[in-house]
Amino acid sequence: MTTAALRSATLSARAALAALLVLFLLLAFLAPLIAPQNVLDPAAIDVLDAETVPGWAHWFGTDMQGRDMLSAILYGLRISIAVALVAMIMSCILGSLLGAAAGAFGGWTDAIVMRAADLQLAFPALLTALLIEGVIAAATGGRPDAFGFWTVAFSIGLTYWAQYARAVRAAAIAESTKDYVLAARMSGMSTWRLLTRELLPNVAVPLAPIAAVNFACAIMAEATLSFLGIGLQPSHPSLGTLLRLGNDAALSLPWILAFPAAVLAILTVSANLFGDEISRGTSQ
């Protein structure tokens, strides 16, 4: 294969993966408009339709409560993607600020931030999220669902900041010796303005592939927490809660587990592959 053909195939792969992610985002955003049933409204659910096999009336069948599975998956996709986006943005902001501070000022700032990042990376991400959620549960009187969505997003968001911090720190070290940074320091610019207006815009390039991969990791983390029963509750039909319900009836009602699992797998794989493609593009 020639270089031109290889480059064309790579661009086509990136475009296909981007289109697939955009499709998932559109389905999640438009769920209230395109879903056949509002699964958040108990009045819209007919228990007489419970456990209906996939067919023309219900393309993905119904669950034990009579909820249309296609509608439940669309709403679940909406909640799962929202949790992942909030967690990713939180991780990116926190990690970027800490990494920029560590790279720009060095010394004790660098030592403290990097040791905290090393400690964070030493523990599995899921274990860290479980620990944070347990702390929130203790602070809310043993009811981690008191804040629901925000509890899960916050727990996952505090789990992935270290990757951003290390990437931004490496870029900030290279940028901190350049003339524009030295001129900003000599002009008396405040620390906050130096980080946010000078350094961060110039070290943001390596963040895109990290964000894409962490987006997929956040979706999997939410699904795992909800599947274990310590994430979102069944009243919030995320992909994780749907998998939890489907697992209880996997033998008698296999479609309740199969369809959410397939959507989760396609979403996370496409996000991971898209992140890999972005990483290759930025490294070229």
Image (cartoon, helix red, strand yellow):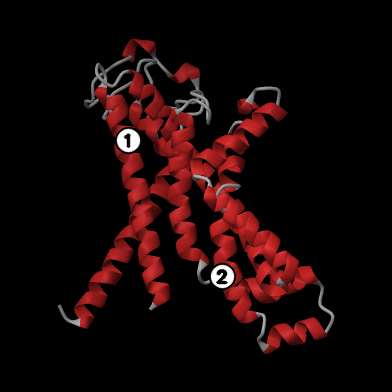
In the rendered image, the quadrant that contains the N terminus is bottom left
**Which residue type does callout 2 highlight?**
Ala
Residue farthest to the left, as pictured: 1
143 sits to left or right of 276: right
Residue farthest to the bottom, as pictured: 179
**In the image, residue 65 lies at what x, y percent?**
39, 15
Q: Which residue is mark 2?
A: 204
**In the image, residue 199 lies at what x, y percent?**
66, 75
**In the image, residue 179 lies at what x, y percent?**
69, 89
Which quarter of the figure has residue 62?
A: top left
Q: Is residue 174 above or below residue 109?
A: below
Q: Which residue is mark 1?
A: 261
Residue shown at 52%/72% (left/top)?
205
Nearest to the observer: residue 263 or residue 135: 135
136 sits to left or right of 225: right
Residue shown at 73%/70% (left/top)?
107
- How many residues crowd mark 1 within 10 Å: few (<14), some (14–19), many (20+)? some
**In the image, residue 267 lies at what x, y percent?**
36, 47
- How many residues crowd mark 2 within 10 Å: few (<14), some (14–19), many (20+)? some
For the residues labelled 1 and 2, the Cα–Cα distance comes to: 34 Å
Which quarter of the figure has residue 162?
A: bottom right
**Which residue type does callout 1 highlight?**
Ala
For residue 64, which numbered disc appears in the image? none
